[in-house]
Amino acid sequence: MQMDRNYGQPNMDKTARRTKMIAALAIMTAVSTVFLVIGTLISVNTVFFTAAASFLVGIAVVKYGFGAGLMLFMGSAVLDLILNPDKFHVILYLAMGGFILVAEGSYKLLEKHIMNLMTRNLVHLVIRIAVFFLGYMPIVLFFPRLFLTAETWTYLAKFAWLRFALPGVGVIAFVIFDLAYLFVKKAYLHIFRI
């Protein structure tokens, strides 16, 4: 039995592959939305559940391509906006899911244009860092409530110099988030042999 290169499944016609992809994306969107709502309801785990929801975007890009990842990203964002009682948290999902979408999409482009693996990975690292800072710094400056409780923010207001530590904390969080995503992606690829 021959395996299809696109989805790692036995050869099937285009309509069947497309139907399977749409069904998988619908399930991933539902799971992502559940993660986002749970992250709001259990406020101490907002970042954890939002990260888990955004990891699904990367898995969709790896498995089905950039367009599928974009559909999942947009569908989850719209459902989160509709169903989530705290509308403010969609910004955090847009930042985290958008980061992974751009990171995976840029890697797909780099695969086509840069053949040397070390060069490709170095360029990809620079792109990921640039995208992180372009997304993170505005959030820290304009929406710190996404990361901090009202009490913590009030405390930081007394010590203005502590606010300048937020970018440094963000870099540490970025490294943890990026490594966690790479681990999840590697585990997914290993389990499902894509």
Image: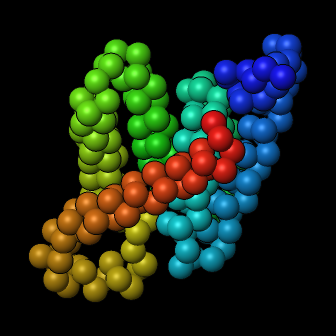
Residue pictured at 59% horizontal, 26% vertical = 65
Residue 9 on image: x %, y %: 78, 29
Q: How many marks?
A: 0
Residue pictured at 25% horizontal, 80% vertical = 156
Q: Looking at this rendering, what residue extends furthest in the front direction?
A: 1
Residue pictured at 69% horizontal, 44% vertical = 192
The residue lying toward the viewer, choosing from 43 and 18, is 18
Q: Is residue 77 visible?
A: no
Residue 145 on image: x %, y %: 41, 68
In the image, taking residue 3 as reference, residue 157 lies left or right, namely: left
Q: Is residue 8 visible?
A: yes
Please identify the quadrant where the N terminus is shown: top right
Residue 16 on image: x %, y %: 87, 21
Residue 112 on image: x %, y %: 41, 16
In the image, taking residue 148 as reference, residue 19 lies left or right, namely: right
Please identify the quadrant where the C terminus is shown: top right
Q: Report the colour scheme.
A: rainbow
Q: Looking at this rendering, what residue extends furthest in the left direction?
A: 161
Q: Image quadrant of residue 187? A: bottom right
Q: Is residue 190 above or below residue 70?
A: below
The residue lying toward the viewer, choosing from 179 and 83, is 179
In the image, taking residue 34 as reference, residue 53 lies left or right, namely: left
The residue lying toward the viewer, choosing from 151 and 137, is 137
Residue pictured at 78% horizontal, 38% vertical = 24
